[in-house]
Each structure stands twice: as C-alpha cells, then as structure tokens.
Image (spheres, grey):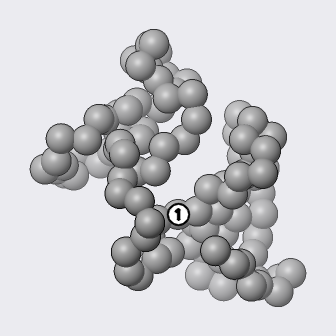
C-alpha cells in the first residue's frame, strides 16, 4: 500500500492511551492509527478500500462499544475494548483486522 498525500491532506492527533490517529483534513474520515507499541505498523481503516483486500476480518474489535442497533451475523470472535474490565485474559494484545 502506498499513501500519497500532501502534508495538509491528513490531520494527525494524539490518541488517548498512546499513539496517533490520522483523519482526512477535508471530510474528517478516520484513516490511520500508529503507535510505538507496534513499531513499523500503520493500521488502516478497512472502509478506505472499495474492493477486496488480501485478508479476511479476524474479529470484531471494541464490540462492547457497538451501537445497540448493530446486528452481527457471523461467527467471528467479538472482542471488548482491551482497556475495559470485561476484556480479561481474552483481550487482544494488538489491534486485529476487524469490521
């Protein structure tokens, strides 16, 4: 993947708990996340891709924060916010590709 953007196309902000998040400076769409905890990685919002990608989703992350009207009709694991008390020992140690 190549990110080709001018310096003013993205707005980067410090993320609570560490890391940085990038948003489109024009429309405000969430685009990227990076943190020292995962050096060399740039986490990309799945919604940025109009077509298929080279991997399938592995889990629904932050599922405990979903809107009450959202219905998930698959058998993928549903992971809570890793910082929440509900996370327990099943919390992911790193972000997982999800939807």
Name which quarter of the figure residue 6 lies in: bottom right
Residue 92 image offset from top left, x and y in percent: 50, 29
Visible residue check, residue 34:
yes
Q: Is residue 63 above or below residue 40?
A: above
Neighbour tally class for label 1: few under 14, some 14-19, many 20 plus, Cα within 10 Å? some
- Residue 81 falls left or right of residue 26: left
Picture quarter with the C terminus: bottom left
Visible residue check, residue 19:
no
Nearest to the observer: residue 7 or residue 97? 97
- Residue 6 falls left or right of residue 53: right
Q: Residue at x 46, y 76 (%)?
A: 49
Name which quarter of the figure residue 9 lies in: bottom right
- Residue 85 falls left or right of residue 95: left
Residue 42 image offset from top left, x and y in percent: 69, 57
Across the whole image, how many numbered discs are drawn on residues? 1
- Residue 93 falls left or right of residue 96: right
Q: Residue at x 13, y 50 (%)?
A: 73
Residue 62 image offset from top left, x and y in percent: 42, 39
Q: Is residue 54 above or below residue 13?
A: below
Q: Is residue 99 above or below residue 60?
A: below
What secondary structure is found at the residue carrying circle 1?
loop
Picture quarter with the N terminus: bottom right
Residue found at the far front of this picture: 54
Residue found at the far left of this picture: 73
- In the picture of the structure, the residue carrying the numbered disc 1 is 45
Q: Residue at x 37, y 74 (%)?
A: 52
Q: Is residue 52 above or below residue 56?
A: below
């Amino acid at each position: 993947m190549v990110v080709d953007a001018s310096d003013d196309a993205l707005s980067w902000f410090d993320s609570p708990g560490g890391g940085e998040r990038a948003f489109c400076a024009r429309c405000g769409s969430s685009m990227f996340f990076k943190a020292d905890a995962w050096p060399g990685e740039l986490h990309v919002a799945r919604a940025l891709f109009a077509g298929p990608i080279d991997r399938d989703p592995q889990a629904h992350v932050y599922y405990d924060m979903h809107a009450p009207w959202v219905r998930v009709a698959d058998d993928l694991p549903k992971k809570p916010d890793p910082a929440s008390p509900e996370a327990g020992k099943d919390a992911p140690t790193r972000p997982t590709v999800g939807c």
